[in-house]
Image (cartoon, grey):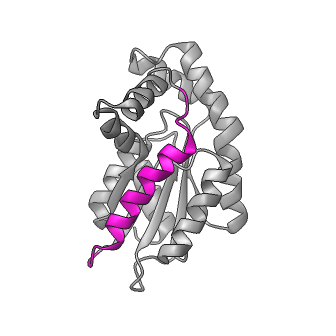
Amino acid sequence: MTLFEDKRPAFFILLGRSGSGKGTQANLLEEKFGLAHISSGALLRERTKTDDFVGRKLHSIMDRGDLVPTPMVFQLWMSALERLHEQQDLKGVLLDGSPRKLYEAHMLDEALAFYGWDKNLVVLNIDISPGESMERLLKRGRHDDDRDDIQRRLDIFEEDVIPALNFYRAKGVVVDINGEQSVEDVHQEILSKLGVA
């Protein structure tokens, strides 16, 4: 796989179960390649700071650990993509933790084609087992990381995210990464499989 060889920006999508280290790897890749980083979680958290109906409703949904309705997420993505497309020196974009549903993947696919970012698409699947995810999140000890909440997130991954991942797998753009190793080893495996180590 060769990236950054033509003038088109690369577009990375990072997927993986909760606790797989997506955020950490996203930050490392952002720094390594000078990528623009779109985090759905960060966009949503920023939106909840506005004290209006949408902000309060999003806050309530996220507090429960439920998935935010796709139209709300997509509106935030599209605003971010539109801003980034105007950048003259854009090297690439990294979308962290989304799409989380099959039809979000279809919608994003159309958006990337619209902007001409569909040719250099790579989906990095940072793979850890459900058991490893549970263990890591329980160790983390956050207030929303009790066993039932974690299990609900794992169930959502199986029911919603796996079909989206399989959509990309059928397109031949998925790169599977063993997430059950050190942060540095995960990073090195990503670079190696991208052919830029």
Q: Left or right? Give the position of 109 relative to 39.
A: right
Could one spot residue 95 in this view of the protein?
yes
Split into 4 quadrants, where in the image is the C terminus?
bottom left
Q: Which of 53 and 90 lies nearest the eye of the viewer?
A: 53
Q: Left or right? Give the position of 132 relative to 60.
A: right
- Residue 148 appears at what percent x and percent y? 59, 14
Q: How many labels were placed on the picture? A: 0
Q: Residue at x 42, y 86 (%)?
A: 6
Does the magenta stretch mainly form a helix, a strand or a loop?
helix
Q: Residue at x 32, y 65 (%)?
A: 83
- Residue 84 appears at what percent x and percent y? 33, 67
Q: Is residue 70 magenta?
A: yes
Residue farthest along the bottom direction in this orientation: 6
Q: Which of 81 and 141 lies nearest the eye of the viewer?
A: 81
Q: Is residue 169 magenta?
A: no
Region in magenta: 66-89
**143 to 29, vertically: above or below:** above
Q: Residue at x 40, y 63 (%)?
A: 81
Split into 4 quadrants, where in the image is the N terminus?
bottom right
**55 to 100, vertically: above or below:** above
